[in-house]
Amino acid sequence: MTLKRNTYLPIIIMVVVMVIISVLAYQRLSGKSNAPIEGQKTLSATAIRNLDIKTTAADIEVVVGGQDQIVATLGGNDRQDQSEFNVTQDGQTGHIELNAPNSMFNIQLWDEGVTLKVTVPAKDWDQVTVATSSGDITLSDLQAQTLSVESSSGDQHLNGLNIQGQATINSSSGDLTGRNNTMGNAKWQTTSGDVDSEQLKGQQSDLQTSSGDISYVQSELSPNVQLTTSSGDVDVTLTGNTDSLQVQSDSDSGSADVDLDNMEFQNRSEHNVLGTIGQGQAKYHLKVNTSSGDVDISKD
């Protein structure tokens, strides 16, 4: 009897899988599953100081425009008969939410290419929060006191941001890319994605990844910069004044190559480097930690 059950078990599993696939295929092909969508909702920004933008799977793009209102525009392919697209105000916070429809098995059914674009007035926001599960996030030219950005598997692109206080950027497996940003206290972290930053100003910059690479290009040095990766490489290019700088690079098994003019080395080995440019206590500190990745620090 036990032998018969074991014999039929793979067949039963196969039938169940085929039923699930058939149901999902039917749901995608029925109704408006592939219908192009366009939707736009607005919200007065007069009394709003905080922005909270969330989607389950769609891409998010936040830009600054010349209007006085917050304009949320939805475009792409979606099951528009089942999606939830809400723009609301709660006190001084504007909420923009886009929830994907689910199948009977609670599986999200987004078609590819769904994008939520949010255009906001040019003002100094108190707090901006942006989150999505599997979508990409693009933020451009925002000014705020604090910023929180989070995604699971999507990439993040940060361009021209001016954040006076804390800026927390998190992703599980997506890449983090930034260009010409100012962040008082920046903490960027991804698990398996790469980190690529050019011209990040601020008091403290902490860029971390587990298995990805880090590329850091900077002209105006920050007082404290920490670059950390486990198995990825770190490539640092300094394009401005490097006076009064201390560099510390530590790797368990990776090589450390530091090529900066006028640097005096207190320690210089294959895996570890400690060096200083200038006399007295250094004004700027660059610290790099890796496990098995290589480190390259140079002046352009």
Image: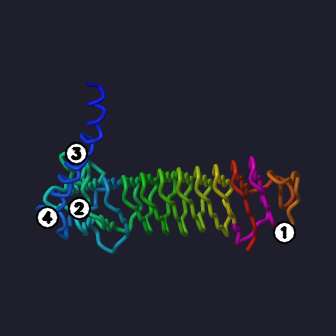
From the viewer's perspective, tell me whether residue 227 is left or right of residue 113.
right
Residue shown at 51% from the left, 51% from the top: 166
Q: Is residue 260 above or below residue 18?
A: below
Cα separation, mark 1 vs mark 2, equals 54 Å
Specify the farthest residue to the top.
Answer: 1
Residue type at mark 4 is Lys
Point out the image quarter for the C terminus: bottom right
Point out the image quarter for the N terminus: top left
N-terminal label among 4 and 2: 4
Residue type at mark 1 is Asp
Cα separation, mark 3 vs mark 2, equals 49 Å
From the viewer's perspective, tell me whether residue 242 is left or right of residue 43.
right
N-terminal label among 3 and 4: 3
Q: Which mark is residue 43?
A: 2
Q: Nearer the viewer, residue 120 or 192?
A: 192
Q: Which residues are magenta?
A: 237-259
Q: Residues within 10 Å of mark 4 (few under 14, many from 20)?
A: some
Residue type at mark 3 is Val
Cα separation, mark 1 vs mark 4, equals 63 Å
Q: Nearer the viewer, mark 1 or mark 3?
A: 3
Residue shown at 17% from the left, 69% from the top: 35
Q: Which residue is mark 4?
A: 32
Label pair 3/4, CB-CB below 8 angstroms: no
Q: Which residue is mark 1?
A: 261
Q: Does 239 lie within the magenta span?
A: yes
Name the secondary structure under disc 3.
helix
Residue type at mark 2 is Leu
From the viewer's perspective, tell me whether residue 249 is left or right of residue 41.
right
Cα separation, mark 3 vs mark 4, equals 28 Å
Name the secondary structure under disc 1.
loop
Q: Which residue is mark 3?
A: 15
